[in-house]
Image (cartoon, rainbow, N blue to C red):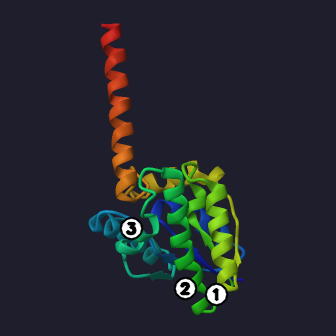
Amino acid sequence: MRVLLHACCGPCLLEPFDALVAEHDVTVLYANPNIHPAEEYRHRRDTLLEYAAANGIDVIEEPYDPVAWMQAVAGLERIPAERCRACFRLRLGIAAKTAASLGFEAIATTLTVSPYQDQVSVAEAGEAAAAEAGIVYLDEDFREQYPEATRRSRELGMYRQNYCGCMLSDIEAQGEREARRQERRARREERS
């Protein structure tokens, strides 16, 4: 089956691509209007493209359109779960339309390797987008391969980001990191 694999970044591509290419003809799609800022978008894209070029993997890139992401999540800024669902719908919708227009039979996504993503919401978005485009969504759960993807990406010296991609997840991740730093500082002070 000809599969268009939506990829969010190079590290998350590793295990899903290897698993899918064992059974399908796979091309990678980089379509991530959620990533902020543009420099981060380029860094993630370039990491993915470098790996793909070194391994003979075909990649299609859709235009970077952060305004489309802002419109998709408008009004959901303070509701992370709903915001992420809207983002999944946007990106997998782009993937499904691209796939259908280029004669692919199915889409899949590397989002399913991350233990940090809501797998049910990803699957719902993928299934709806694929159905609308008249193709198939391959609902593959690659979370068990996340540790291996992490190990391999580190071994390969790939850029590994510390937030999902959007500006709001960056702010949230910074807040979580700061809270952990404060907790560690408080524990050290208690022991002193």
The mark lying in front, picked from 1 and 2, is 2
* Amino acid type assigned to the residue bearing label 3 in the image: Met
Nearer to us in this view, 108 or 79:
79
Residue at the image position 50 percent from the left and 55 percent from the top: 152
Residue at the image position 34 percent from the left and 48 percent from the top: 171
Task: State the image coordinates of residue 89 (x, y, percent, origin top left).
Answer: 56, 69
Q: CA distance from mark 3 to mark 1?
A: 28 Å
In the displayed structure, 78 sits above or below 98; it is: above
Residue at the image position 51 percent from the left and 69 percent from the top: 7
* Amino acid type assigned to the residue bearing label 1 in the image: Phe
Residue occupied by mark 2: 98
Q: CA distance from mark 2 to mark 3?
A: 21 Å
Residue at the image position 56 percent from the left and 64 percent from the top: 110
Residue occupied by mark 3: 70
Nearer to us in this view, 80 or 53:
80
Q: Please report whichever mark, 2 or 3, sits nearer to the chain's N-terminal start.
A: 3
Nearer to us in this view, 76 or 95:
76
The mark lying in front, picked from 3 and 1, is 3
Disc 3, SS: helix
Q: Is residue 105 left or right of residue 52?
A: right
- Direction top: furthest residue: 192
Q: Are marks 3 and 1 in contact (CB under 8 Å)?
A: no
Residue occupied by mark 1: 104
Task: State the image coordinates of residue 47 (x, y, percent, origin top left).
Answer: 38, 67
Q: Are marks 2 and 3 in contact (CB under 8 Å)?
A: no
Q: Residues within 10 Å of mark 3 (few under 14, many from 20)?
A: some
Q: Please report whichever mark, 1 or 2, sits nearer to the chain's N-terminal start.
A: 2
State the quadrant of the N terminus.
bottom right
Task: State the image coordinates of residue 86 (x, y, percent, origin top left).
Answer: 52, 64
Disc 1, SS: loop
Q: Please report whichever mark, 3 or 1, sits nearer to the chain's N-terminal start.
A: 3
